[in-house]
Amino acid sequence: MKLVRKMFKNEEGATAIEYGLIAALIAVAAIVAMGQLGNTLSNTFTQVENSMAG
């Protein structure tokens, strides 16, 4: 029983896990944002190409 209490009182690993989750969330948000930006840029360059060709 003391071992279980000691494990719940030990919060050193919790901080590392929280930082890891925050970093993962930021990475996912950055990937989604860059994907959207890439699609927008691709559409813009396609429009410019079509304007110059026509």
Image (cartoon, rainbow, N blue to C red):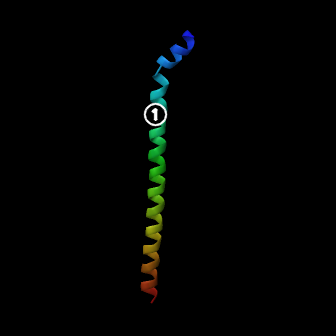
Identify the residue under disc 1: 18
Q: Position of residue 33 (x, y in %)?
A: 44, 57
Quadrant (top left, top right, bottom left, bottom right) of the N terminus: top right
Residue at position x 44%, y 35% in the image: 19
Residue at position x 47%, y 64% in the image: 38
| Circle 1: element type | helix
Q: Amino acid at mark 1?
A: Glu
Query: Which residue is at the far top?
Result: 2
Name which quarter of the figure residue 34 lies in: bottom left
Quadrant (top left, top right, bottom left, bottom right) of the C terminus: bottom left
Q: Position of residue 11 (x, y in %)?
A: 46, 22
Residue at position x 46%, y 62% in the image: 36
Residue at position x 44%, y 68% in the image: 40
Q: Position of residue 53 (x, y in %)?
A: 46, 87
**Is residue 17 shown above or below 49?**
above
40 vs 25, nearest the viewer: 25
Q: Position of residue 8 (x, y in %)?
A: 50, 19
